[in-house]
Amino acid sequence: MDLVYPFLLVIAAATIVVSLLLFGAAFHAAQRGAEGGLAHAARWCACFTFVAAVFGAFWIRRTTTDWMHFQWSLGPALLCAFWISGAFLPFMWPTDRSRQRAWDTRSTDWTRSGWWFPVAALALGSASVTLQLLEPGRVPAERNSPGPLVGTFELAAYGLGLGELPSLLQVRFPHDAQRGMDHLTRDLTVPLSVLTLTAEMLCVYVVLAFGLRFVRSASVRLALGFVAPIAVSVILFVRWRGFASGLWQETPYEIRAFGPTLAAAAFALALLAVAWLRDRWRARGSQATRSQGVDEFARG
C-alpha cells in the first residue's frame, strides 16, 4: 500500500490547523501585546506535526522501495515544517521582553523553544543519507556512484573549490558536453535536493530569528514571529517547490551551489547557537539579580 499520499494529507491538514492558530495568535498579540491560548495550542500542534513528519518519513522509507516517493515524503514535510515554524520563532531569545514572564514562571514548558524547527529540519534533511547507509541494499547502485555519504561530501567539496569534478559527473555522452558535466545518479539526486532545501530553509530561519531582535515593540515582535515564516514560504514557494516536488533538474548551477549552501547553513546555525547561549547567560544573570533584589526587599 502506498503510504506517501495519506502521510502528506495528514501533514498538510495539521499544517492548515496550525496556520489558522498562528493567524489567530498573531491577531491576539497585536491587540494585547502578549501571547494567548492560541499560541500555546499552535506550539503543541506544531510539535505533533514535526514528530509525525520525522517518524512518518522514516516509516515510509521502511515500507516503500520507490526512492522518488521517499523524496516526495521529505520535501513537502520540510515545507510544512518551515511553514509552521512561526509557532516557535518568537521564543528563540530568552531576554525578549515578550518572554520574560514565561522564562520565570513557565520554564517547564518544553514547547517554548525556537530550536524545534532546526532540529526537525536537520532530522528530515539528513534522513535521505542516513537511511541509505542503514539500508544500503534498498537503493540499487548506479554506474560508478561512490555511495550517498562519499558522493555528498565530494559534491560539497567540488562546490567549495576543495576538489575536482567528481568522476561521477565526467561527461560520457556528446549531448552532455554543453552542460559540462553528466547527470547525477538517483542515490545522490535525492540527498542533494533535500539537503539543499534544508540548508536554504535554515538560513532563512536564522535571518528571521536575528531580524526579530531589531523589532522594539513586543506586540509587533510576537505577531511578526508567528506569521513571518508563512509569508516567506509564499514568496519562495516557486523556488522551493522544485526541490519538494521531485521536479528538480539538478542543473550545473545547483550542483556547484550545493557546497556553499551547506557551508552557509552551518555557519548560520553556529552563529545562532553562540548568540543564543550568550543571550541565555544574560537572561539567567538578570533573573538572579531580580531574585536577589526580591530577597533583600523581603528581609528589609
Image (cartoon, rainbow, N blue to C red):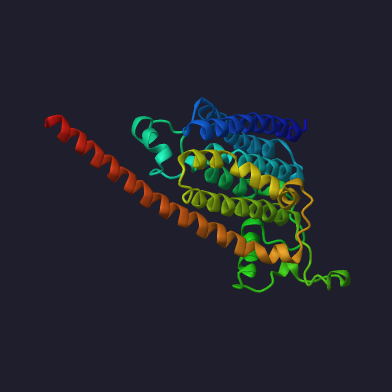
Q: Is residue 12 visible?
A: yes
In what quadrant of the picture does the C terminus appear?
Answer: top left
Depth check, front residue: 94 or 300:
300
* Location of residue 186 (image quadrant): bottom right
Q: Is residue 153 visible?
A: no
Residue 87, compared with residue 174, is above or below; it is above
**Residue 46 picture location, percent across and down:** 57, 33
In what quadrant of the picture does the N terminus appear?
Answer: top right
Depth check, front residue: 259 or 42:
42
**Residue 251 picture location, percent across and down:** 76, 63
Depth check, front residue: 47 or 71:
47
Q: How many numbered tags mark residues here?
A: 0
Side (left or right) of 102 relative to 188? left
Q: Residue furthest right?
A: 175
Depth check, front residue: 70 or 179:
179
**Residue 11 picture location, percent across and down:** 67, 33
Identified at 39% across, 33% down, the residue is: 102
Identified at 36% across, 46% down, the residue is: 280
Side (left or right) of 246 relative to 157? right
Residue 167, compared with residue 224, is above or below; it is below
* Location of residue 94 (image quadrant): top left
**Residue 39 picture location, percent across and down:** 52, 30
